[in-house]
Image (spheres, grey):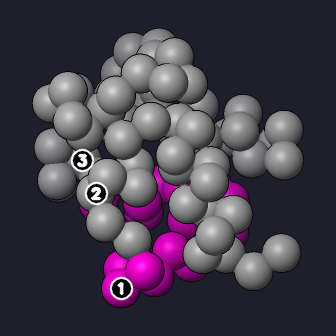
Amino acid sequence: MADIVQAVREVVRTVVKKHVRDDEPLVSSGLIDSLSVLTLIAALEQRLQIHIPAADVQPDDFDTIALIVDTIARVSPP
């Protein structure tokens, strides 16, 4: 799980272009928009070699690093 958290932090940092805390709002604060969420999803899928089904997620699932990690755990088989 620690590897996933670190990978998510790195992908978020790349998309946002700055360091963010695990609990820092991304979507609700306007730090990233809906297009950036799609970019984030694609980068996470590539980095973690997973598939995040669009039907199973919404933008709020990507509001913080902690929520992203929870979302990945929920939608990706172990």
Q: Earlier in the sequence, mark 3 or mark 1?
A: 3
Kind of residue indicated by mark 3: Ser
Kind of residue indicated by mark 1: Ala
Which numbered dot is residue 28?
Answer: none
Task: Please state if 39 lies on the left or on the right of 10 as rendered.
Answer: left
Residue 42 image offset from top left, x and y in percent: 42, 63
Q: Identify the image quadrant of residue 73.
A: bottom right
- Residue marked by disc 3: 36
- Residue marked by disc 2: 59
Q: Is residue 78 above or below residue 69?
A: below
Residue 25 image offset from top left, x and y in percent: 34, 28
Q: Residue, x 50% and y 24% (percent of image)? A: 23
In three-dimensional space, the C-alpha distance between marks 3 and 1, rounded to whole angstroms, equals 18 Å
**Circle 2 sits in a helix, a strand or a loop, which is it?**
helix
User: Which quadrant of the rendered structure holds the C terminus?
Assistant: bottom right
Which numbered dot is residue 55?
Answer: 1
Query: Disc 3 or disc 1, which is closer to the eye?
Result: 1
Q: Residue, x 67% and y 75% (percent of image)? A: 76
Q: Residue, x 43% and y 80% (percent of image)? A: 56
Q: Earlier in the sequence, mark 3 or mark 2?
A: 3
Task: Please state if 56 lies on the left or on the right of 47 as rendered.
Answer: left
Q: Identify the image quadrant of residue 39.
A: bottom left
Range drawn in magenta: 38-56
Q: Are marks 3 and 1 in contact (CB under 8 Å)?
A: no
